[in-house]
Image: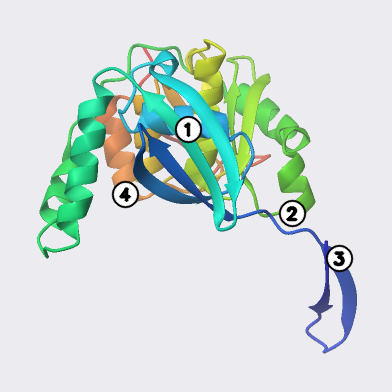
Amino acid sequence: MDSASAIRPDGSSRGVTRSWVPEVPVALEFNGLSYAVMMATPQDLEDFAIGFALNEGLAASPAEVADIAVAEVEQGWIVRAALSGLGIDKLTERVRSRVAESSCGLCGIENLAEVARALPVVPPHRAIEPAAIFAALAQLRDHQPLGRATGAAHAAAHVAADGAIGLVREDVGRHNALDKLVGAMARCGQALSPGFVLSTARCSFEIVEKAVRAGATTLVTVSLPTSMAVARGKSAGLSLWVLARDDEVTLVNDASA
């Protein structure tokens, strides 16, 4: 914890003591190849590695991500894992592409095409009652120890259809929190549907895509969506609720059967 000063509009001040949310570089290595370095909170990193691999399409199931080893090094953390299955081809192609990108100026073309690729279609699902969302929001803070301590951590939660919170994962990064949740659910053999995913994040298109690819049918976020998030969610048939507050929630897309 550190000491700081809180300054008021009239110029007066008061001393405060704050804890900061941990944010460190986390290198993800698969089959001995460096795949990505993420700024993340160094907890639940095994869940992070599995959820990241599933959401990136490097693995089709948690069984294809084995021998996870987590190590703290001088510069941050390294998470190493062994991949099996079809994801190996994608891994090597990604590494090849990254090497090529360092020497060309047109590599964004491939990235744009990747962004535009079609999402899986969300299966038929039942509508979520607003009462379940409000019930989950009322409980969420009790499941956010890092958020309570720092006021700067995102959370992603899986919530049952009746509003009961099951698993929650936290991280400084909103995408990382969702990856961790996906990994934790997969390790437990649990699906993201029925029920819904509740995220404290802004509803960006990446959050929508990760939720859809992980098998969620309904996504609820506490902040507003981007235009691309709305469009991508609708194209996939994702039920989307946003701006979830204690007294109101906005339904953007009802794709329930």
Q: Position of residue 180 (x, y in %)?
A: 54, 32
Point out the tag, 1 or 2, that comes first from the N-terminus.
Answer: 1
Check disc 3 and report the residue beneath it.
17
Point out the tag, 2 or 4, that comes first from the N-terminus.
Answer: 2
Crowd around label 3: few <14 · some 14–19 · many ≥20 (10 Å): few
Crowd around label 2: few <14 · some 14–19 · many ≥20 (10 Å): some
Residue at position x 59%, y 57% in the image: 74
Label 3 and label 2: CA atoms lie apart by 11 Å
User: Element under label 2?
Assistant: helix
Label 1 and label 2: CA atoms lie apart by 24 Å
Label 2 and label 4: CA atoms lie apart by 30 Å
Left or right relative to 58: residue 249 = right
Q: Position of residue 27 (x, y in %)?
A: 46, 47
User: Element under label 3?
Assistant: strand
Residue at position x 47%, y 17% in the image: 127
| Residue 122 image-quadrant placement | top left
Point out the tag, 3 or 2, that comes first from the N-terminus.
Answer: 3
Position of 213 relative to 2 (above/below): above
| Residue 166 image-quadrant placement | top right
Check disc 2 and report the residue beneath it.
150
Which quarter shows the C terminus?
top left
Check disc 4 and report the residue beneath it.
227
Q: Position of residue 177 (x, y in %)?
A: 55, 39
Point out the tag, 4 or 1, that comes first from the N-terminus.
Answer: 1
Crowd around label 1: few <14 · some 14–19 · many ≥20 (10 Å): many
Label 3 and label 4: CA atoms lie apart by 39 Å
Left or right relative to 31: residue 242 = right
Check disc 1 and report the residue beneath it.
49
